Amino acid sequence: MGRLRHCFIIRSPHGNSRICIKAEGFLELQKYLDKHHKGGRVAVISDTNVAGIYHDRIKSALPEADIFVTEAGEKSKTMKVAEALCADLLEAGFTRKDVVVGLGGGMITDLAGFVASVYMRGVPFIAMPTTLLAMIDAAVGGKTGVNLGAKNIIGTFYPAEAVLVDQAFLKTLPEREMKTGMAEAIKYATILDASLERDLIANQPDLRPILEKSIAAKVQVCNEDLKESGLRKVLNFGHTFGHAIEYLSRYKLTHGEAISIGMVLANKIAQKLGRQSKAHGDRISEMLKKHGLPTEVPKYIKLKEVIEMVYRDKKMDGQKVTFILSLGMGQHKIVKLTPDELMKMLK
Ligand code: NAD
Ligand code: GLY
C-alpha cells in the first residue's frame, strides 16, 4: 500500500480533507486556525472524560475558545444531544464563519462532525481524535452520525477539513479502549493491507506504522468511493454483525469489541461459502485474541436478535445484505446474502 507518510488527503465535494499525523496536536491546531480561520471563533466539542483531562491544555492553546462538553459514552450520540449542541452554538452566537473542533473519540468526532454539518447548513469542521479507533477510522473519511434505534441511522458525509492526529493523546487512553482501536487496525490488515499483520503480531507493536498504514488504507478507499457506493463497503467487514451486537449489548461492549466478534462471525460465513480456509480464519482470531479482543457472541445476546437487527441495517439492499468476506490476508470479496441464508450458515 505504498510507503509510509505523515499527511494524507481525501478529496471530497466539500473540498480536501487533510489528515496529518503530528506531535503537539494543540500547537498544530493553533497554527491551522491562525492560517485558515483567523478571526473566526472556535467551538470545541468534547466529552466529560476528554475535557476533564485536557481542559487546561485546550484553554492554554485556545484561550478564546468556547468548550461544549457532553456526557462520555455512546448514549450521547443522539439527535437530542446534537440538537442541544446546535442550540448551545446558537445561543453563544456562533455563525458560519466560525469553526467546530471535535476533540475526542469516535463518539465525539461522529457527533461533532454531524453538528458541524447541519448547524447553519454547515460550518467548518476540524477533528482531533483522541482514541486509536478515531485516529485510524472514525475521524477519517467524513461519515458523521447519531444513533436512532440502531447505529448511525441519521448522519451525513462531511469530511473534516483537517484531521490532526497526535498519538500523545493515547497516553491517557484506558487499556480497554486501546484494544478497541486495534480491532479496526486488524480489520485493515485482514481486508486491505496484509503488511499490517506483521506490525500487529509483533511482541511489542510499534504504533506508528499501525497508525500510518491504517490511515493510508482508509484514505485510499475513501478517495475511490467516498459515499460508499462500491469499494467503501469493504470497510464494513465485521460491522454487519458488529453494529447489531454493539447495540444489543446496550453498549456494554465497545465498538471495537463488537466488531471483533463480527469479524469472527463473518469468517464463519466465508468458510461456509467455501471462500476462506479455516487456517486463515484462525489467524485472524489469533490476532484478535492477542490484542485481548473477544471472539464470541456474549451469552446474553441471541443470534436470532442479531439477525433481526441486520434487517434494519443500512447495509441492506432490497432483501439482501451486503456482506464482506476476507479471502486471505489483505484480500476482500463483497457478496450479497439474505438474512435467512445468514441464519442457516451461523447455526
Ligand atoms: P468513544 O469516543 O466513546 O471513546 C471511548 C472512551 O474513551 C470514552 O469514555 C472517552 O471519553 C474516552 N476517551 C477518549 N479519548 C481519551 C483519551 N485520550 N484519554 C482518556 N479517555 C479518553 O469511543 P471510540 O471507540 O473512540 O469510538 C466509537 C464510536 O466511533 C462509535 O460511535 C462508532 O460508531 C464510531 N465510528 C465511526 C466511524 C466513522 O467512520 N465515522 C468508524 C468507526 C467507528
Ligand atoms: N467505518 C466504516 C467506514 O468509514 O466506511
Image (spheres, helix red, strand yellow):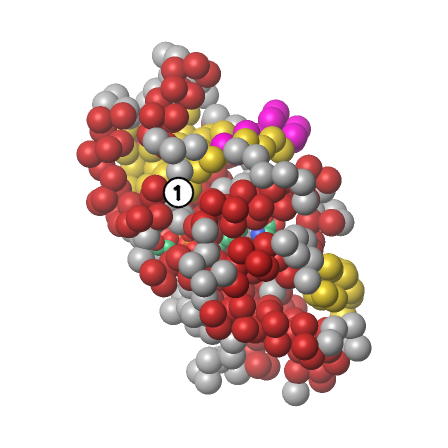
Q: Is residue 12 magenta?
A: yes
Which image quarter: residue 227?
A: top right
Left or right, 274 with respect to 52, comes to right
Name the residue located 62 percent from the left edge and 33 percent from the top edge.
10
Ligand 1 closer than 8 Å to label 1 CB: no
| Vertical placement of residue 266 versus 298, above or below | above
In depth, the one of 72 and 275 nearer the eye is: 275
Q: Residues within 10 Å of mark 1 (few under 14, many from 20)?
A: many
The vertical placement of 205 against 328, above or below, is above
| Residue at 45% over, 51% down | 206
Tell me residue 66's x, y (percent). Answer: 28, 28
- Location of the C terminus by quadrant is bottom right
Can you name the residue that lies furthest to the left here? Answer: 56
Q: Residue furthest front?
A: 203
From the top left corner, tell me how far across and down residue 118 is, in percent.
50, 34
User: Label 1 belongs to which residue?
Assistant: 167
Which quarter of the image is occupied by the N terminus? top right
Left or right: where 84 falls relative to 109: left
Q: Amino acid at mark 1?
A: Gln
Residue drawn where x is 57% and y is 35% of the image: 5
Query: Which residue is depicted at the point 61% across and 25% down?
Result: 15
Relative image position of residue 138 (x, y in whole percent): 51, 47
Residue at the far top: name it: 39
* Res. 55 visible in picture: yes
Magenta-colored stretch includes residue 262: no
Q: Which residues are magenta?
A: 11-20
Q: Is residue 200 left or right of residue 82?
A: right
